[in-house]
Amino acid sequence: MISALTGTLARLGPREEAALLVPQTNPVDGRVWLARDSSFSTFDPVTAALESMVRVDVRDRLPLAPQEWTDHRGLVTISKTSANSALSPAQLPKAITAAMNGNVPFLWTVARTEGETKDDAGPKPTPLPLSLTDLTEFVKTLPSRQNPLRKASA
């Protein structure tokens, strides 16, 4: 919709308008679990951009059991702060962490980074706002086939 409005206001010719309406990324066949802090708007730009690239299940929490994970190929969190966040990687239940086995891409975004993260080996918080390039690069890391968790449980 924004692209169409931009094209109209810019009075683009048919060729330029067609180029403007070409998707910037090709949608990926898969699903991502997006855990968003409840203080954020239900229409946030990260979710909107991700939904144009991959199917997104928006939740206000991290997965609690491996069974919740079976159809997901990645995990994105959007939280207010990196300090004591219920949506930080350290808060993933042990069962999920074991099931993920390091095979599932994880993007931890925060509005405000506070202090150092204790787990130097784990994911680092990415400050908001994110660029479309950052999201596109994350989506490119998603497994292209069967969920790695299903392979591990087979």
Image (cartoon, helix red, strand yellow):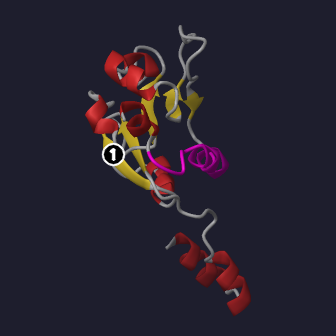
Q: Position of residue 100 (x, y in %)?
A: 43, 28
The residue wearing badge 1 is 58
Local packing at callout 1 (Cα closer than 10 Å; few below 14, some 14-19, many 20+) is some
- Based on the picture, tell me whether residue 132 belongs to the magenta stretch: yes
User: Looking at the image, which residue is at 64% across and 46% down?
Assistant: 137
Question: Which residue is at 58% across, 73% downward?
Answer: 3
Q: Position of residue 41 (x, y in %)?
A: 35, 45
Number of dots carrying numbers: 1
Q: Residue furthest front?
A: 154
In the image, residue 102 above or below residue 83:
below
**Vertical position of residue 154 compared to residue 96: above or below:** below
Amino acid of disc 1 = Val
Q: Is residue 13 visible?
A: no
Q: Return the x and y of residue 74 as percentages of the image width and height.
A: 47, 40
Question: Does the magenta run of residues contain 8?
Answer: no
User: 59 or 147: which is nearer to us?
Assistant: 147
Quarter of the image with the C terminus in it: top left
Residue ranking furthest to the bottom: 14
> Taking 40 as reference, is 100 above or below it?
above
99 left or right, relative to 110: left
Q: Is 113 above or below relative to 108?
A: above
Counting from the top left corner in percent of width and height, residue 67 is at 27, 35
What is the magenta range?
131-146
Locate residue 147 relative to residue 141 in the image: left or right: left
Which residue is at 56% across, 23% downward?
A: 123
